[in-house]
Image (spheres, rainbow, N blue to C red):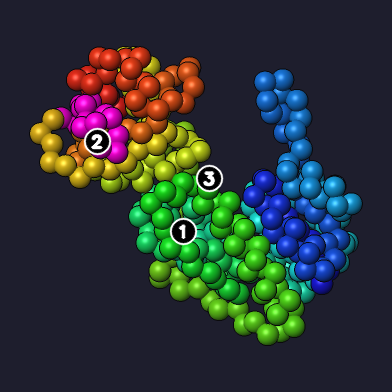
Amino acid sequence: MRVIYMGTPAYAVTPLTALLEGGHSVVGVVTQPDRPAGRGRGLMPPPVKVYAESQGLRVLQPATLRDAIAQAEIIALEPEVVVIAAYGLILPRAVVEAPPLGCVNLHPSLLPRHRGPSPVAFTILEGDEIGGVSLMLLDRGTDSGPVLAQEERPSMPEDTTGALTDELFSRGADLLARVLPAYGRGEVTPVPQDGSRATYARKLTKEDGAIRWELSAAELWRQVRAFTPWPGSYTRWRGGLLKVVEAVPIPELVTSAPGSVLRLPSDGPAPVGVATGDGVLGLVRVQPEGRRVMEAAEFMRGYGDFAGTTLTDVS
């Protein structure tokens, strides 16, 4: 099949690789423009661009797809289908309707649950027992088009958004390799989504990472994992920020006020914990402001008076 691929970050390289290994003719790769990055703020190409150029593929990097010239350049490549995986820009109607087989989007949730830009984070944050990946056709709505195929993946207690995103796009690439040829042969019937079951995973902000200790330990444990690597989960201690990098919920009855730092038994899963609205959040790894990530035990050795203090919300 003649395919245009649209994707930008490192985890979007895997589906492109699957298309090439499947023998499809990738006539163009559309990715976002190079962006300033690093301490020198030099322009850095997106990972998908780096890989595509290494394979000798044509790369397009329009700043916006609202531009008629950019749209015409894409349509002129005459793709049979457009495949999208974390591209990052909204496709205009002219592009969506150009390929005969439409635009197939790889979405890392079991649609219609968690439509929107942050599906993996909300899968973890809301404690879903089952997550997964969907292949769906774009329509005029937000992730609301008919579904070609889905694959479930049971949630694991060690899941973080970063690691789970990588895995789901890898699974999605395998699913794409199996389903796209069958779809091209007319052997796959798109199934409309049940809009009454839809939920929306909004875009996260830096402010979402502020820890509210009145929540339960289980909720905060999910937050720490859902907001890894971004925006992180942080609290205030001694006038600075303290980031909680890894934690574990300890369902103990506590009488201390939420935010109180408690020394825990030496044979437990964490050396120190924080009282919450329900249970204790054990701290496994932390990062003081301006310093590196460290084990909580190491942090305790450097700050022996940490236990007995109170962590406050970031206002």
In the image, is residue 76 part of the stretch drawn in magenta? no
Label 3 neighbour load within 10 Å: few <14, some 14-19, many 20+: some
* Segment colored magenta: 257-272
Q: x and y percent of residue 192 in the render?
A: 53, 76
Circle 2 is placed at which residue position?
267
Question: What amino acid type is highlighted by mark number 1?
Answer: His
Q: Nearer the viewer, mark 2 or mark 1?
A: 2
Residue 162 got which mark?
A: 3
The residue under the point 28% across, 15% down is 304
Q: In terms of image quadrants, where is residue 2?
A: bottom right
Q: Earlier in the sequence, mark 3 or mark 1?
A: 1
Q: How far apart, in angstroms, are the residues tagged by discs 3 and 1?
A: 17 Å
Q: Quadrant of the C terminus?
A: top left
Circle 1 is placed at which residue position?
114
Q: Nearer the viewer, mark 3 or mark 2?
A: 2
**Quick check: 285 left or right of 30?**
left
Residue 30 got which mark?
A: none
Q: Secondary structure at mark 3?
A: helix
Q: x and y percent of residue 58 in the render?
A: 87, 52
Label 1 neighbour load within 10 Å: few <14, some 14-19, many 20+: many
Question: Which one is in front, 297 or 161?
Answer: 297
Question: What amino acid type is highlighted by mark number 3?
Answer: Gly
Q: Check the image and report above or below for 132 versus 56.
A: below
**Quick check: 142 left or right of 20?**
left
The residue under the point 36% across, 33% down is 284
